[in-house]
């Protein structure tokens, strides 16, 4: 099996709505490919841009990717905010609704065998999640409360040697919100994770 994302999938990922530059997507896929085989969890699916890269990597590694999202969008995706996309509003509920887009993305990419879609708030999913993880990608809601919650809820399930990737990490407040950076500091501080890579706002850490 090739270890480079096929051109057809690369083009599909590039055309999928989302907030992940291609160099960071490549680094994310490389981080996932470096993880042990097993169950992988992506927090924050949105329309599936990163899910294509991670789902493909999971297929290469005989792993299963679970992608978790409530699909109502984060604060910055709501009407009046910077990252609102009116084409993602459901006509009946008048709420942001990204699930149909994700479903189509996974189907078009032929990744249904390696990707499981879970629709839930992370605080709901944390109540029943109990599978060990070999790879965890944190890219959900970026408020301090939820970012810290998502780390505290799911990082303990990483096995030793498991890989943690965190997106939208900005050390400098002028570049972006600080909660993901606080999560990285917590992981590398009290929890002893080792930083093994970075690309743009993506950090890759390994659990001791
Ligand atoms: Mg992100």
Image (tube, grey):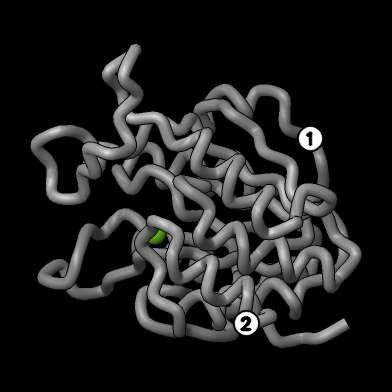
Tell me if residue 106 comes above or below residue 189 in the rendering.
Answer: above
Label 2 residue SS: helix
Is residue 113 in sight in this rendering?
yes
Image quarter of residue 84: top left
Mark sitting on residue 130: 1
Residue 183 in the image, given as x and y percentages of width and height: 43, 58
Q: Residues within 10 Å of mark 1 (few under 14, many from 20)?
A: few
Task: Name the outermost residue toward the top.
Answer: 92
- For the N terminus, which image quadrant? bottom right
Tell me if residue 11 comes above or below residue 47 in the rendering.
Answer: below
Q: Residue at x 57, y 76 (%)?
A: 10
Q: Nearer the viewer, residue 84 or 141?
A: 84
- Establish whether ligand 1 lies closer than 8 Å to the Cβ of label 2: no
Tell me if residue 147 comes above or below residue 60 in the rendering.
Answer: above
Mark sitting on residue 7: 2
Image quarter of residue 170: bottom left
In terms of sequence position, does the residue under pointer 1 or pointer 2 come before the other?
A: 2
Is residue 205 in sight in this rendering?
no
Give the left or right position of residue 43, taking residue 78 as reference: right
Give the left or right position of residue 197, taking residue 181 as reference: right
Q: Residue at x 52, y 74 (%)?
A: 11
Residue 88 in the image, given as x and y percentages of width and height: 33, 37
């Amino acid at each position: 099996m090739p270890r480079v994302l096929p051109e057809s999938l690369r083009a599909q990922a590039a055309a999928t709505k989302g907030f992940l530059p291609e160099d960071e997507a490549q680094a994310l896929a490389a981080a996932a490919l470096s993880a042990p085989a097993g169950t992988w969890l992506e927090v924050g699916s949105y329309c599936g841009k990163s899910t294509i890269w991670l789902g493909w990597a999971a297929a290469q590694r005989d792993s299963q990717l679970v992608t978790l999202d409530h699909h109502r969008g984060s604060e910055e995706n709501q009407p009046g905010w910077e990252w609102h996309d009116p084409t993602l509003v459901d006509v009946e509920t008048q709420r942001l609704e990204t699930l149909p887009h994700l479903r189509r993305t996974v189907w078009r990419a032929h990744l249904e065998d390696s990707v499981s879609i879970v629709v839930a708030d992370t605080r709901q999913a944390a109540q029943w999640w109990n599978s060990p993880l070999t790879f965890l990608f944190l890219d959900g809601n970026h408020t301090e409360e939820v970012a810290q919650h998502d780390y505290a809820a799911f990082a303990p399930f990483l096995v030793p040697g498991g890989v943690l990737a965190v997106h939208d990490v900005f050390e400098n407040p002028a570049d972006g919100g600080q909660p993901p950076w606080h999560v990285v500091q917590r992981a590398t501080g009290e929890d002893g994770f080792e930083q093994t890579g970075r690309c743009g706002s993506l950090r890759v850490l390994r659990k001791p």
